Amino acid sequence: MKNKIIKAKLGTKQSNLWGYHFIIPDEVAAYFTEGKDRRIIVTFNGKINNYCAIMPSPEGFFIMLNKDIVKKLQIEEGELVTIEIEKDTSEYGMPICEEFEAVIFGDEHVFAIFQKLTPGKQRNLIHLVNKIKSSDIKIYRAMAIAEYLIECGGKMDFKNLNEKIKEFNQRNKIL
């Protein structure tokens, strides 16, 4: 599958889930979507990569952005951005850091629970570890997630997971 390069204007939408977006032409969206698989990797203005999905709406297709990416791009609503889109062929829809892989994939029981989670929940857990800069803290975060997965048996409640992470941090004196 070949990459596509488009130009799109940054838009905003008032929503509890997202605020910034780029409208994607239907023919480009069709090229990258197969059934429920809409995962892509986008490069904005040749410098910022982001793993995301092409989302449908009544008005057409779009890519969501968070405030952090908009801030890094140093753009405002209505500005034109060059977007390179490629199909995401990774297993989980984003890269996995070594620390997460070692802790979660290294324990057969934890890995079996992780594999039974929905793809979105898997990505959320991966992101919770990937966003940390310190390797040591990534390991502790992955260990807290592993402990939580065993306790909940895969019945995820992210509020409870956050409490487990806080408890784990306190137990291990991590701020």
Image (tube, rainbow, N blue to C red):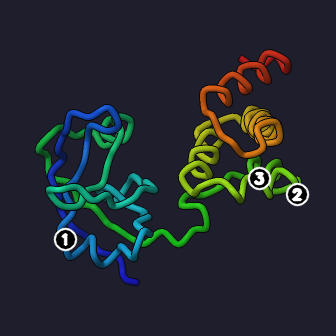
Q: Under tag 1, what secondary structure?
A: helix
Q: Give how far apart the Cα atoms at labels 3 and 1 are.
A: 37 Å
Q: Which residue is identified by label 2? A: 108
Name the residue: 53% across, 72% down. Answer: 89
The residue positioned farthest toward the bottom in the image shown: 1
* Mark 3: amino acid: Ile
Name the residue: 74% across, 32% down. Answer: 137
Neighbour tally class for label 2: few under 14, some 14-19, many 20 plus, Cα within 10 Å:
few
Q: Earlier in the sequence, mark 3 or mark 1?
A: 1
Left or right: 85 with respect to 7?
A: right
Q: Are marks 1 and 2 in contact (CB under 8 Å)?
A: no
Expressed as whole percent of the image width and height from the top left, the position of residue 101 reads 76, 54
Q: Which residue is identified by label 1? A: 26
Task: Identify the mark at residue 113; answer none if there is no mark.
Answer: 3
41 vs 106, nearest the viewer = 106
Which label lies toward us, 3 or 1?
A: 3
Expressed as whole percent of the image width and height from the top left, the position of residue 98 reads 74, 53
Neighbour tally class for label 3: few under 14, some 14-19, many 20 plus, Cα within 10 Å:
some
* Mark 1: amino acid: Asp
Q: Under tag 2, what secondary structure?
A: helix
